[in-house]
Amino acid sequence: MTDRHSLPWHRARVILRRLLAADLDAFQAYRHDEEVGRYQGCEPWSATKALTFLEAMSTVDLLDPGTWCKIGIATRNRSHSTGD
C-alpha cells in the first residue's frame, strides 16, 4: 500500500478512515435502514456479526485490485478516533 492509499485521509470538513468497533451503532443503523437495504442489498446483521465485520475492516488491505473494502466517512466534528 502506498502513502496515497493510507488512511485516515483528512480534508477541511471530511475524514476518510478505517471502520472501527466504535462504529457499531452507526453501522447497525445503516444496515437496518430499509431504504439502504433496498438499493444496496443490505440486510440487518446481529451485533456479533457486525462487530466481526468492523474488526476485519479495521485491518484489511486497502485498495488492492480485485478486492473490496468498506471505509468510514466522517465529518471532522463527528469522527471517532482516527489513530493520529
Image (cartoon, rainbow, N blue to C red):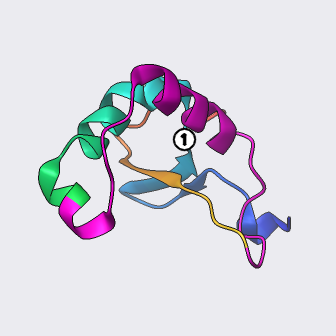
Q: Nearer the viewer, residue 71 or 12?
A: 71
The extreme bottom residue here reads 65
In the image: residue 81, left or right of residue 77 = right
Is 54 a magenta residue?
Answer: yes
Q: Please tell me in which quadrant of the rendered image residue 13 appears.
A: bottom left
Residue at left 43%, top 31%? 23
In the image: residue 46, left or right of residue 64 = left
What amino acid type is highlighted by mark number 1? Leu
Q: Nearer the viewer, residue 57 or 40?
A: 40
Residue at left 13%, top 58%? 35
Q: How many marks?
A: 1
Residue at left 41%, top 37%? 79
Q: Which residue is mark 1?
A: 19
Q: Is residue 84 visible?
A: no
Q: Nearer the viewer, residue 75 or 52?
A: 52
Q: Is residue 51 visible?
A: yes
* Residue 2 in the image: above or below residue 79: below
Residue at left 74%, top 41%? 59
Where is residue 29 drawn, in percent x and y?
Answer: 24, 36
In the image: residue 68, left or right of residue 40 = right
In the picture, which quadrant includes the N terminus?
A: bottom right
In the image: residue 78, left or right of residue 10 = left
Which residues lie in the magenta part? 38-66
Q: Please tell me in which quadrant of the rendered image residue 12 appears.
A: bottom left
In the picture, which quadrant includes the C terminus?
A: top right
Q: Please tell me in which quadrant of the rendered image residue 63 appears.
A: bottom right
The extreme left residue here reads 35
Where is residue 67 drawn, in percent x and y?
Answer: 71, 69
Where is residue 18 drawn, in percent x and y?
Answer: 59, 45
Q: Nearer the viewer, residue 60 or 34?
A: 34
